[in-house]
Image: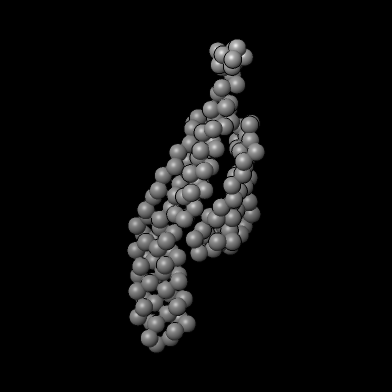
């Protein structure tokens, strides 16, 4: 069994998700949130490998959060001279919101509908590892039903 734990938000790094892959299922355990940071339950699914046709990884850049984050960042720079604490808060929020505009997306195609997992850009390595585990599990699942491959391995 292979499992990967990852953060689902840049600013609120304590909001975690976990995906486990074994020979029969992909088990997801993602946190539901209110406003992106207040925990509000879990989204747990067990997806049989037989129902998955593939997975893909992509990076997306969302312009609205990036612009809003940059605006907050520049407001923080302007407020910084008058109030250090308020300027620092705006700077951190601006960087965090702008950073959340850059996301890595893992799309798992299950029974004809996409299951989308969005994570911050710094979790791309973990998502790539997870995507490779899914591809390996799908290949193993396909190989165990191929009788030609079974008999070829048996003669060797």
Residue sitting nearer the eye, 124 or 101: 124
Q: Residue at x 44, y 59 (%)?
A: 100
Q: Quadrant of residue 144?
A: top right
Q: Residue at x 40, y 55 (%)?
A: 102
Of the 4 image quadrants, the one containing the N terminus is top right
Check the image and name the residue furthest to the bottom: 82
Residue 98, given in percent of the width and then of the height, sits at 40, 63
Check the image and name the residue furthest to the front: 156
* Count of labels in the image: 0
Of the 4 image quadrants, the one containing the C terminus is top right
Q: Quadrant of residue 64?
A: bottom left
Question: Does residue 61 appear left or right of residue 138 in this picture?
Answer: left
Residue 79, given in percent of the width and then of the height, sits at 38, 82
Tell me if residue 27 comes above or below residue 10 in the rendering: above
Residue 133, given in percent of the width and then of the height, sits at 55, 38
Q: Residue at x 39, y 77 (%)?
A: 76
Residue 93, given in percent of the width and then of the height, sits at 45, 70
Question: Does residue 2 appear left or right of residue 100 in this picture?
Answer: right
Q: Is residue 45 visible?
A: no
């Amino acid at each position: 069994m292979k499992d990967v734990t990852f953060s689902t938000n840049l600013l609120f790094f304590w909001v975690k998700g976990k995906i486990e892959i074994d020979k029969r299922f992909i088990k997801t355990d993602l946190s539901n949130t209110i406003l992106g940071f207040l925990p509000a339950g879990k989204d747990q699914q067990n997806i049989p490998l037989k129902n998955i046709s593939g997975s893909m990884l992509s990076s997306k850049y969302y312009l609205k959060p990036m612009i809003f984050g940059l605006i907050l960042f520049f407001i923080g720079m302007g407020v910084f001279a008058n109030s250090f604490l308020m300027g620092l808060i705006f700077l951190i929020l601006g960087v965090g919101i702008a950073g959340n505009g850059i996301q890595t997306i893992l799309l798992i195609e299950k029974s004809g509908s996409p299951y989308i997992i969005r994570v911050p850009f710094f979790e791309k390595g973990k998502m790539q590892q997870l995507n490779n585990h899914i591809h390996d599990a799908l290949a193993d699942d396909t190989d165990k039903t191929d009788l030609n491959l079974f008999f070829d391995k048996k003669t060797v």
